[in-house]
Image (tube, rainbow, N blue to C red):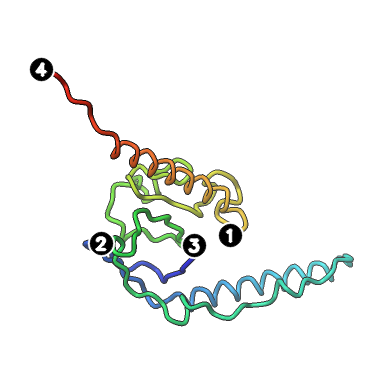
Amino acid sequence: LTLVGMTRTYQDGLMSFAPDLARNIARGDANLMSLLDEADAYVARNGLDLPEEPAARRIEPDPECMTNPIRELHLAEAGIAAIIWATGFAADYSWLKVDAFDNKGRPRHQRGISTEPGIYFLGLPWQSRRGSSFIWGVWHDAKHVADRISTQRKYLAYHAAKKPEPVDA
């Protein structure tokens, strides 16, 4: 898994990313700590006998994708044939010039499978269930999308390998 910054542009197979990944991750870490502080305060206020979970507050060292972020990526050269769009906190699809959105700018999809071939979405509110937009709940939709991509690739490979039989005149 490699994280990248917000997508800036896409043209002729080349995708470029903003240098905002580290800042976005830091904001996410700060939000997590704030949430844990609130949970601990609730436990203390209500006299609940719950064990502390020190591992929940451990922030791992920054991975390579944060210390040496990818700023540009040529999708075909990288072997990328599908994009699973996980926008996170605030959706911004302005760069995506495909007919995959309704008149309010929301993705048209069925459980993350877009109306546009090769475009997929994850993390949308109530995509298939309440937890769809949360990191702990997105896996249901991620599995569904990955399974559909796999099935489609197998189908296309099968039909590409199938040779038409000659027709006698």
CA–CA distance between discs 1 and 2? Answer: 29 Å
Dot 2: what SS? loop
- Residue 57 on image: x %, y %: 70, 75
Residue at x 42% of width, y 55% of height: 84
What separation in Å lies between label 1 and label 3 (alpha carbons)?
A: 9 Å
Reading the image, the residue beneath label 3 is: 88
Percent position (x, y) of residue 64? 48, 78
Q: Residue at x 28, y 39 (%)?
A: 160
Tell whether label 3 touches label 1 (CB within 8 Å).
Answer: no
The mark closer to the camera, 3 or 4, is 4
| Type of the residue with mark 1 | Ile
Residue corresponding to mark 2: 13
The local secondary structure at tag 3 comes to loop
User: How far apart are the two marked residues, 3 and 4, measured between alpha carbons?
Assistant: 59 Å
Residue 169's tag is: 4
Asked where in the image residue 97 lies, by quadrant, the reply is bottom left
